[in-house]
Amino acid sequence: MSVSQAPLRTSDGVPGRPFVTAHPDLDSAITRSQGYLLSEQRPEGYWVGELMVDVTLVADMVAFYHWWGRVDAGWQRKAVRHIFDKQLADGGWNIYPNGPAEVNATVKAYLALKLAGIPTTDPRMLRAREMARSLGGVPRMNTFSKLYLALLGLVTWNHVPTIPCEVLLIGKWFHVNFWEMSNWSRAMIIPLAIINHFRPTRPVKVDLDELYPTGKWELDETLRPRYFDFSLRNGFLWLDRLHKFAEWVSRQGLHPFRRRAIRRAETWMLERFEGSDGLAAIFPAMLNALIALIALGYPDDHPQVIRAHHELEKLMHFTDDSVRIEPCFSPVWDSAIVAICLRESGVPGHHPRMKRAAEWLMDMEIRFRGDWIHKNPADVEASGWVFEYANQWNPDVDDTAMVILALRLIPTDDPRRRDECRTRAIRWMMTFQCRDGGWAAFDKDCTKSILEKVPFADHNAMLDPECADITARILELLGYEGWDRDCPQVQRAITYLKGQQEADGSWYGRWGVNYIYGTWQVLRGMKAMGWDMDEPWLQRGAAWLRSVQLPDGGWGERCNTYDDPIFKGAGPATASQTAWAVMGLCAMGDASDPALARGVEWLIRNQNTDGSWTEEEITGTGFPCVFYLKYDMYRNAWPLLALATHRKLCRGEVPGRAT
């Protein structure tokens, strides 16, 4: 596909500034990237890249199949190969490439290998054992990991915090209730509460006694409340003791509300199977739901059990000698991003591929009043999009904003439908603004920090707080849509962003790694709003981006920035993060910026001959410090948008408007 060869000039129109000549290979790099992405489109009109994660999903499935008693030897051999392929030289397993060994991943992988019959005297197992012990072993695992051990009889249920089913019976009038938990925690906790009630232990013929560095007494200490300790955490530990007594009472048939609570939990779970690719369409909830069904007494040949297992199998990718598992699918998110990149880079809106993409996206709109109504009961017509193929209960703000950004660029054969879709979705999205002016992912004002003190809240995902990256993306959309900067909602959002800026000028990135992601999105969002980019707070953001540019001209940052911000902006250059930084600097309006020129040159220099880019690092965030994702589409989509944005800057064109 040819690209327009319009004359290049600066974008600000300031007299006396020299014209800027773009990189001589810019047009050809854009053309190659367009061709590659168009070739990746599915016949239905969407794009989807693989989500790559650590070994814990495969390890969990090995443990599950041993608990279920349905071990397929061929599948297990492939799982073992995958786990060993990811083992570090020091014997452990990490949760992001080039990161240190992590205790949950290491113990889970070690257990899976042991269940699969790998001798503990195998040198690889000996190294894994020593690393697991050095990390604290079984006592240092989080609650959800220990629960899987309890299913296999490797720890007792008294070593796992109680998750009472009665949480569903607590009314919303109570300060701490079920609907104050994050969307993803609700989906994990309901099946776990069912499991916690039945305690369906199926002992295996192995143990993990060697993974207790100082003895099993440490397990008791993790949930032992302290006298004369008046902290919230300690209060919840005493409450957990009370819950455990109540659990014992319920098993004697004396608990007055338990039967009702179990029925409510089962009904809640089954309802959310409908219109969804498994519970919440994400691996942990889906696996927990399958275990819960079996614990409830559903036979293996029951349609719901077969269906739940099939949804998990769909997440598996096989090679001749290995198997890996995705946590979920990302077709809506990927399709919206790629559509934006192609249109911004000059692919005509009437191109059949673009029209097909728009139709597919419009067909994926959620017109169902899902679980969001419990935190956001606004009288608004249901709309929104989800990340996955099907998950009608959980449309989210970020995907919705990205889809609207895409649809506004494509003149479909049915413009009325498209415009009604956009208008409806924007109205829906705007009702999710939180009290402090920001937007979160799934819910509104899901920020009651007391929930982070409960004993089973150690997965760092109990809340869904508003964040700078999503808020800035919404401002970007509103700017392109022509919203007045003096609109109260816009003003509150900008005040929120100013308050979230770090002392060094950067912004924290909740859904992408990390400060490069947050900072780019804020600068791009404010540019789209027509803000004065010379204001000091925005100049400080751009200065921070320049300060962390690598000597080779790229940008990179690793997941360790979530553990300690001292590492912010430090890491090997990646295509996606370099693209984000380039777009952040483009927002400042100076096409002659040397840092910008070096970033563009890095992207062009590192492009593969087929138009793609190679990226080994993880740049996507699931739950900070706990779970990260490599979006395989990122390495090829964001660089195209960055190059297109830079070309528009040189030509004096405006990003967010189709060419």
Image (tube, helix red, strand yellow):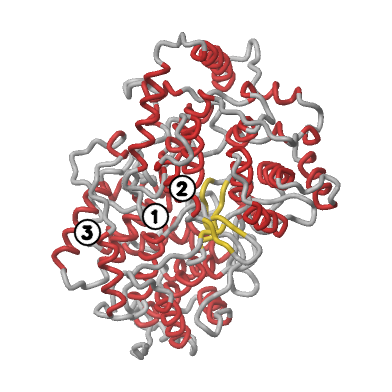
At 30% from the left and 34% from the top, the residue drawn is 374
Vertical relation: 383 (above or below) 450: below
In this view, the mark in front (3 or 2): 2
Q: In the rendered structure, which disc, 3 or 1, sits on the residue that comes first in sequence?
A: 1
The reply to whether dot 3 and dot 1 touch (C-beta < 8 Å) is no
Residue type for callout 1: Glu
At 75% from the left and 55% from the top, the residue drawn is 88
Circle 2 residue: 282
Q: Is residue 85 left or right of residue 643?
A: right
Q: Is disc 1 surrounded by few (<14), some (14 to 19) or many (20+) residues within 10 Å?
A: many
In this view, the mark in front (3 or 1): 1
Question: Looking at the rendering, in which quadrant would you find the N terminus?
Answer: bottom left
Residue 524: in sight, yes or no?
A: yes
Q: Is residue 273 left or right of residue 208?
A: left
Q: Quadrant of residue 466?
A: top left
Vertical relation: 622 (above or below) 218: below
The reply to whether dot 2 and dot 1 touch (C-beta < 8 Å) is yes
Circle 3 residue: 422
Residue 494: in sight, yes or no?
A: no
In the foreground, 341 or 198: 198
At 51% from the left and 10% from the top, the residue drawn is 252
Real-space CA distance between mark 3 and mark 2, rounded to the nearest whole angstrom: 27 Å
Real-space CA distance between mark 3 and mark 1, rounded to the nearest whole angstrom: 19 Å
Q: Quadrant of residue 35?
A: bottom left
- At numbered mark 1, what does the secondary structure look like: helix, strand or loop? loop
- At numbered mark 2, what does the secondary structure look like: helix, strand or loop? loop
Residue type for callout 3: Arg
At 71% from the left and 47% from the top, the residue drawn is 116
Q: Is disc 2 surrounded by few (<14), some (14 to 19) or many (20+) residues within 10 Å?
A: many
